[in-house]
Amino acid sequence: MLQAVLWDMDGTLVDSEKVWAEVQLRVLPELGGTWTDEDSLGLIGSDLRDAVQVWLKALPAGVITGEELAERIFGEVIVSLRREVEFQPGALELLQALRKADVPCALVSASYRVMIDAVLSHLPDDPFDVIIAGDEVTNGKPHPEPYLTAAAKLGVDPTQCVVIEDSMTGTESGTAAGAYVVSVPHWVPIPEAPRRLVVNSLEVVTPESLRQLLS
């Protein structure tokens, strides 16, 4: 039985990974660091606290504190997300179909609450029953805590939930929580595995197809 669908945000619900990459590629070189597209790809799906430590290692020692760097990068990403977001193909349609079918949905993101609020401001109403932000858990993805927390708040069995993710880090988090994972990779390949469905787009996913995964 499909008890709930647990959504990742960046790269899954919205095409925001390119915004993150653009900000990193602009800010880190300005501070005297070296940063490439490959470096940005390596951080997709990472907990933001871990990302800050990687950014600091790419910069000259003492040029900026971790708190200052986080505030600058996060701030520029938030400004961009408040201005405009691009939803991933099929994401809003699937979300609306799940709501119509009375399937509970949670948003489980490595992004901080302020960034989530910036994205959700583009939706006419809040389609999520529960929201778990990266700054509201002790252990970020790939640890199972974010998805286990969402399932607990919804009052559902995580093994009877489907997680929708775009990154390997998030996919590992969902798998570790015991959920069935639908992976929609865009930037980083994700291999097939037990209790995992890899698709090219959410346009091919429906509430009924998600139910069949757990049947």
Image (tube, rainbow, N blue to C red):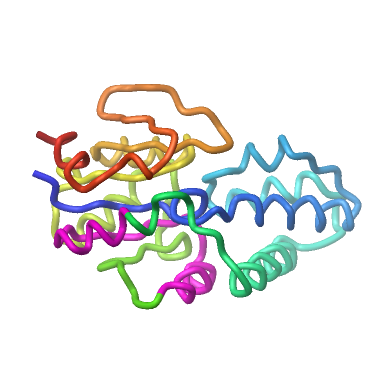
Coordinates of residue 68 in the picture (x, y in percent): 74, 68
Q: Is residue 113 above or below residue 173?
A: below
Q: Residue at x 19, y 53 (%)?
A: 4
Q: Quadrant of the N terminus?
A: top left
Q: Is residue 78 left or right of residue 30?
A: left
Residue 145 location in percent, x, y?
A: 34, 50
Q: Percent from the top left, x then y, of residue 64? A: 81, 62
Image quarter where the C terminus lies is top left
Query: What are the residue bounds of the magenta stretch?
Result: 94-123
Residue 214's place in the image compared with 109, above or below, is: above
Q: Residue at x 61, y 43 (%)?
A: 43
Count of marks overlaid on the render: 0
Answer above or below: position of 16 versus 181. Answer: below
Say whether residue 109 is magenta: yes
For residue 196, which quarter of the picture?
top left
Q: Nearer the viewer, residue 29 or 128?
A: 128
The residue shown at (52%, 28%) is 189
**Position of 159 compared to 136: left or right?**
left
- Residue at point 30%, 42% (across, down): 205
Q: Looking at the image, which is closer to me, 10 or 201?
A: 201
**Quarter of the view holding residue 48:** bottom right
Q: Is residue 175 magenta?
A: no
